[in-house]
Image (cartoon, coloured by chain):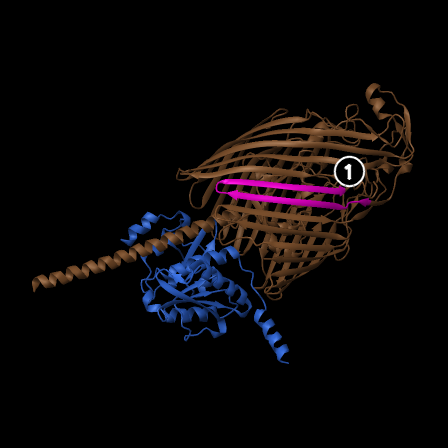
Amino acid sequence: MKFGFFKNILITSSLSLINFSNLNAQSNDILNSISNDMNRFNTIATITKQNEHYQPYIISVFKGKELENLGITNLKEALQLAPGVDITTDNINNKTPIFRGSNPLGYGQTKLFIDDVLVNNLFFDSYSEYLGMPIEMIKRIEIVRGPGSKTNGVNAYAGSIKIITYAEDFKDFESQDKFIFKYGSYNYKMGGFIKRFKTDNLDATIDFYYQEDNKKLSAGPDGYSTGSMSINGLYDNTGLSQNGHAPVWLKDYSLGLNLKYKDLTFKGRVLDHTQGSAYGINLSLPQDRDRVKIPNYYLELGYDKNINDFHVEIKTGVQYDAFDSKAKLAPNGLIFMDAYQNSIDGSINTVTFPDGINGEHLAKQRTLYQSSYLTYTGFDQHIITTGYRLLKEETIDMFSKLSSWTTGDLALVDYTDTFPFFNKNAKRNVQIFSLQDQFRYSDNLNFIYGFNYEKTSYKDAGLEPRISMVYQQDLKNIFKASYSRAHRNPSWQEMFTKNNNARQGSTDLEPEKVDAFELAYIKKFSSDTYLQSNIFYLINKNQIYNSADNPIYRNVLDTDIYGLEFEYSGHITAVDKLYLNYSYVTGNSKIKDTGVNTHLTNVAHHLAKGYYIYNINNVLSLSGIIKYVSAKSRISGDNRAKTPAYTTLDTTLNYKNHKYNYNITVGIKNIFDANVIYPSAPNTYIEDYAQEGRTFFITLRKEF
Amino acid sequence: MKKILFLYLTIINIAFGYNYDNVVLKAQASIFPKIILLDKKIEDKLIDGKIVYTIVYDKTDYFTALSIEKFINKNFQGHLGAYTYKINLVDLEDFSQETQTSAIYVLNLKEHIEKTARIAREKGIISFSYDINNLKKGLMFSLVIEKSTVLYLEKGNLYTKKIDFVEALLQMVRFVEKDYTYERNEGNMEYNNRFSLKKIYASLI
């Protein structure tokens, strides 16, 4: 009996223990699974900048789908929504985003990455050719203001823009195939598609678009009116100045291919960008079909591998870009000296060009690069990354053809060897070494510190430190502080342009440098409502500058810039979204060789932007965008009135069909036909560059 | 007339959709159903031997609720651990004491959140919320993406005899009380992606 009793206890205990063990085992599995899910979503949140407020720099993130519904049509329009970002242009319609008023005359102050590949062209160090990229090709835009985001040896001087296409792929967040058709003012036509292929190991995404328009904008009087191609007392061609319409049309083909096979990646893009010659490379109003081609191709192979506590990232790639102009450069009847002969012996022989001057110019560049980075995560509170990036940049083809300087005949003469517009042997090697530590002092306080060290075959940038801190006081209050030094190497045109009255390159240029101090405070009112505010102080040294009086590029501009930015995102009701930002920037510049001190010029001191989306229902949404850009004062010696302030208002209606998964979006931009003006450089187009007024568009997007 | 009425009802039914965050929705849809399995008294909540997961939505959010159902079905393929499950989409106005359910997931309701939470509490079932702000209105769990993914539990809503979570879950969550702030004295300030599984497993034994 006794034995039976103990036996029962033993059996019951054993069964309980088995049940308990089973429960524990099941709970372990479930907890493991939840833990894995959380880590997976952490990764997605970090990569997609879902947790942007905790990043150690000042960042704004815009999602492609939302921008589509807002009626944003391309990258340029999307950038114009960001705090502190303004757009400027030049005589060839090379549009440049200006971040926080930093050197509106320079092009490469900001960097553009597409799927982590740096795509700034070498010739201008700009990315104007990508600004027309249709928004439907873009999944997300991450805009970092200030140099704080430099990673993997890339210097972002005033800011960086990261475009993430629909090639990005996570489990449960797979992008859908789609095609797009768009039509708008100026006979704008666009068609494109995104197609994905996926097998167990291979993931491939192709995107393609074609777009064109016939845009012409009112322009003039052209640069001849202010003395371009005139020399006091010798030649007066001001009477040849023209008024009319600047051909600013575009024609783009773009094909992108992203492949991922196990740990290997392949990223390639071919962009064939052609645009009208705009305001003329020699400031004479061009003919309608005169054009500039700025193609941009890249191909990158990557290897990405986690090995225990190490992460290895190796990349090698090649990029091609070109400046390829074919245009009438001077009007009929031009009388000027034989510039070719003058370059040889200084003699001044007068030549008449009864049919004007035609020109064809090509400079084709190739950049080869290779980088290797190693990250070690084995320490408790540190993540250490170190590595190098090597670049070999060179011009691989160049020709220079003009109507005859000797006879004035219109037929082209090859001046490639005798009177080139560019140094055909242009070359530069760059080596960058970087070291960075992400230090988690506590759960609420994180630091990133490190440096870049750069050597080039011209002037070196040297050692550039960086430190930043993120302090999360609680869920509602986040503070950031950072100091960083960055530089911009001179662009190809600033170094190697020759025999040009308006631009003369110099290989003696030092890199432009900036010391940036930034403080930010983010107040989160709820999970989807926040106010981000920040102040910044930028000490810019050796900024590159030239002028009509002295066309040689030189490091003569020192500029101190300071300002503040506010960014609010939230909603008024449960069914809408309100986004607002305001930025103020001011400062002082000193032109060292003339000793002139000025306030910050050519810069809008106040920028205010905002949008509102109201979801009428699950099918229709109505939205509006408002942008205010304040007046811009002129640079020293330019006595024209300020470039006027303007306010634009856009509105868009979006219809979504859930059953067949398509959207139709119609919109009107600049409803009140505001006078949008971008400033021209002194002694060029005295009336500045007027932009388009009211326009409309309609888009059809179908997803599969 | 019928067509007009149908159109009217359709428009009313789909009016005013809230802007949901897709990453948060999917994270919640992946994790919340698994939490139900960590209740030691899950057997008491089965309906006809199944876990019934009810998504409570406002009329305006029907498509969102539908997409969550689709996502869960794709991921869980009809089984939560050893149990089969069923997902019910229930309009807020139809949710009552009579609604047969093992757990509820509440989307952003414009009103009656307290009432919904009270029903859940009285029924002794687990409640999940899309919006963390609704925890102070009586719902139990939410998930937020901060620097990392954080699972929140309103401690005040936990004390019911009908629910008994494994201890390890309570070490994993961050408690929230009256406001959308940290609770500083609980010693669980660590982000959840850094929680120690070893510690959690130790607590199971």
Up/down of A64 relative to A406, above or below: below
Kindly report the secondary structure that dominates the magenta region of the rendered protein.
Answer: strand
Chain drawn in brown: A
Up/down of A412 relative to B12, above or below: above
Which residue lies most toward the top here? A345
Say whether residue A117 is visible. Answer: yes
User: Of B36 and B84, which appears nearest the observer?
Assistant: B84
Q: Quadrant of residue A287?
A: top right
Q: Is residue A98 left or right of residue A231?
A: left
In the rendered image, which quarter contains the C terminus of chain A?
A: bottom right
Q: State the image coordinates of residue A494 (x, y, percent, origin top left).
A: 71, 30
User: Of A587 and B69, which appears nearest the observer?
Assistant: B69
Up/down of A70 relative to A58, above or below: below
Q: Is residue A456 left or right of residue B54?
A: right
Question: Is B51 a magenta residue?
Answer: no
Which residue lies most toward the bottom here? B1
Identify residue for label 1.
Answer: A681
Residues rendered magenta in the picture: A246-275
Residue plotted at (71% across, 29% down): A397
Q: Quadrant of residue A344?
A: top right
Q: State the image coordinates of residue A416 (x, y, percent, origin top left).
A: 77, 26
Q: State the image coordinates of residue A82 (x, y, percent, origin top left).
A: 63, 48
Subunit under mark 1: A
Identify the element where label 1 is drawn.
Answer: loop
Chain drawn in blue: B
